[in-house]
Image (cartoon, grey):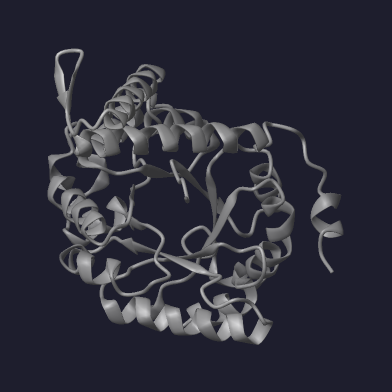
Amino acid sequence: MMVLRSLLFVPGNSMRMITKAATLVADGIIFDLEDAVPLADKETARIMVRDSLKAVKSDGIYLFVRVNALITGLTGEDIQRVAVDGLDGILLPKAEARSDVAELDGMLEKAEKAQGLQPGTFQIIPLVETAKGVMNAFEIATASQRIAVVSFGAGDFLRDMERSASSITPEQTELLFARSQVVTASRAAGLPALDTVFLGLLTDREGFEREALIALQLGFKGKMLIHPTQIEMANRIFSPSAEEAAEARKVVAAFEEAQSRGLGAISFEGKMIDIMSYRQARDLVNFVDFIAEREKTAQRNIPVSIFRFFSSNP
């Protein structure tokens, strides 16, 4: 099970921020080689990310790299540098069609063969952030067995729609169709979906929470982030509450006891519980238990020496 309630972008050309990433409790990190890195720094960023993967990965966090879009011609160089042992996968920006994912899939297959890694080692997160991508969301989500999750990017989508992120309404009705399309297509493909980064002020915690709750209600399983202060809120919002977990455990226990007596449906606290309700409750319990187990081993705000990064390399 890959749980990505919080997936934090970290500039690939900032050793200070990469080192900080090793102390955070985000479920995943995206080392960015695209928007956060000027053209002149691309090669330096590739090397810094590659040489930092094992040091950050040692704490069990999921690690992805956002490569440059295929249209730039830089994607192949990115893959050659960063697709190494310790990387979980690649975030592909501007994913617009099945062919985009297939092209990246081929690059990753070559990288695995070149390094003697198991086929399918590297996963893919397509980033749907254009009108064309939104309309092709299902074909993108089903384009490769490597796809672990599908993500939505509102910033470039709004620009593509000739709208400004600064004028978006609190209810975000401008994004309702695109969000719904991406999350529904993802679920139809049997995959979770991640919501866009928050485009408002970093200090606007109420706005972030409101947006995350909209995403949760629509069916997203997590959110991409641009600042460490957003991690705790994202993890909380996209996790079942203690009350929800307790209720689910009672439903599971009651239904399994009824099953042992040959019953297929029961009345529980005034509600009818059938097999589908049971399965939903059981999945929630498994999710809660997985999160609890993962957080036992998660490193929490322990300072990390920069020498750990260099000593982890061959």
Q: Position of residue 134 (x, y in %)?
A: 20, 62
Residue projecting furthest to the top: 269
Q: Quadrant of the C terminus?
A: bottom right
Residue 220, image x, y percentages: 29, 44
Q: Is residue 254 above or below residue 227?
A: above
Query: Relative to 143, is 28 on the left or the right?
Result: right
Query: Measuring 67% from the left and 81% from the top, which residue is drawn there?
Result: 115
Q: Quadrant of residue 300?
A: top right
Tell how many labels. 0
Residue at the limit of the structure toward the front, as seen here: 261
- At 61% from the left and 64% from the top, the residue drawn is 87
The spot of residue 123 in percent (x, y) is: 48, 67
Question: Is residue 105 depicted above or below 286 in this figure?
Answer: below
Rendering coords of residue 120 (x, y %): 51, 73
Query: In the shown orientation, is residue 101 left or right of residue 157?
Result: right
Q: Residue at x 64, y 45 (%)?
A: 21
Q: Quadrant of residue 221?
A: top left
Q: Is residue 301 above or below residue 58?
A: above
- Between 291 and 131, the one lying in front of the other is 291
Asked if 306 appears above or below 24 in the picture, the reply is below
The front one of 34 and 241 is 241
* Residue drawn where x is 83% and y is 51% of the image: 308
Q: Nearer the viewer, residue 219 or 245?
A: 245
Horizontal side, residue 283 vs residue 296: left or right: left
